[in-house]
Image (cartoon, grey):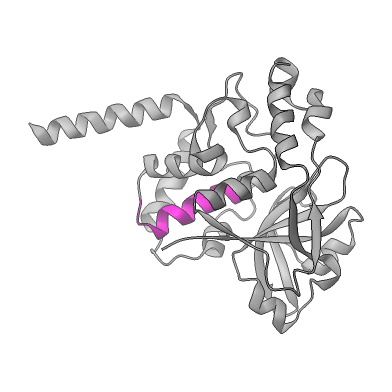
Amino acid sequence: MKRLFVYILGIILVQGLSAQTTYQRVDSTKICKLLRQADKQATTLWIARQFLDKPYVAHTLEVNDREQLVVNTRQLDCTTLVETVTALKLCIANDKRTWKDYLDALRSLRYRQGKLDGYASRLHYFTDWIQDKVKMQLVDDIQQPNPPFSAVQTVSVNYMSEHPDAYKALKANARLVPLIRKQEQALTGLKVRYIPKSAVRNTRLLRNTIHDGDIIAITCNKKGLDIAHLGFAVWHKDGLHLLNASSLHKKVVEEPMTLYRYLQKHSTFTGIRIVRIKSK
């Protein structure tokens, strides 16, 4: 009887969790298959490569009038790719293999201190994401040694509060804008070290500093923004490459050009920050 009660309670909990989640059956099937099949030692890159060629689609989280945990493995942008892969990596490394485990992991990454409490609880700026996940001991923010972390970014963010019409939730609810502005003000002035794009070369120092599967956050000097793009580090013989959900290629790819060349082609890109997923 006790075992039956626990089983029924488990069903109720999962159903309650799913009621706050937006996904399609193909998404849960994909996630559960990966959780079931992946070896506990599966690398971040192995997981990321399971999403190669998935279409790039922006704004896939902006589908509900009320904030819900959105799971979409069919269409990815640079942020949702990083969150999807990181959530899977944390689950697999810690031998957590259920759909609920994955939802818990994804929520813990996407929201401040892992608590979904409306649109403003989502971590919209990646600097904020990094700080919050470091506090939760889910990732490490790598800022040493110097070199190659020889440059300093002084964070200055206000893009969302200055362009509320560009965001569905802010456009629909002006009362959210002051909450976002307060978050921006808390981030502004923060100083972080990064590797300048001129130093992102095929050197022994960089190979020792950046590991395959590290999260690469591309810093920028575009007004009001901190990070322009995200992806995963992949070392090839000719140097460092980026596995990312690419708006240029319209899909998830391992960029054929080196990251050095990629950075040089964008005048607003200034360099890279490195974030390392923590796993047992």
Q: Is residue 158 left or right of residue 85?
A: right
Magenta: main secondary structure: helix
Please say if 114 is above or below 45.
Answer: above
Q: Is residue 92 visible?
A: yes
* Residue 80 screen position, x and y as percent: 62, 44
Which residue is located at x 70 percent, y 83 percent?
204
Residue bounds of the magenta highlight: 81-96
Image quadrant assignment for residue 182: top right
Q: Residue furthest left?
A: 1
> Is residue 6 found left or right of 200 in the rendered image?
left
Q: Which x, y percent locates residue 211? A: 61, 71
Q: Is residue 163 magenta?
A: no
183 or 91: nearer the eye? 183
What residue appears at the point 73 percent right and 57 percent down from the top-left corner?
192
The stretch drawn in magenta includes residue 91: yes
Considering every residue shown, the one lying at the far bottom of the view is: 204
Q: Residue furthest right?
A: 267
| Quarter placement of the N terminus | top left
Dividing the picture into quadrants, the one containing residue 235 is bottom right
Which residue is pictured at 49% across the width and 54% down the height? 137
Residues 102 and 73: in front is: 102
Residue 187: where, in percent of width, then height?
A: 72, 42
Relative to 264, say whether 79 is above or below.
Answer: above
Residue 55 is at least partly visible in this image: no
Q: Name the residue located 70 percent from the left edge and 38 percent from the top edge.
A: 186
Viewer-proximal residue among 236 and 127: 127
Q: Is residue 271 left or right of residue 204?
A: right
Q: Position of residue 96 (x, y in %)?
A: 35, 51
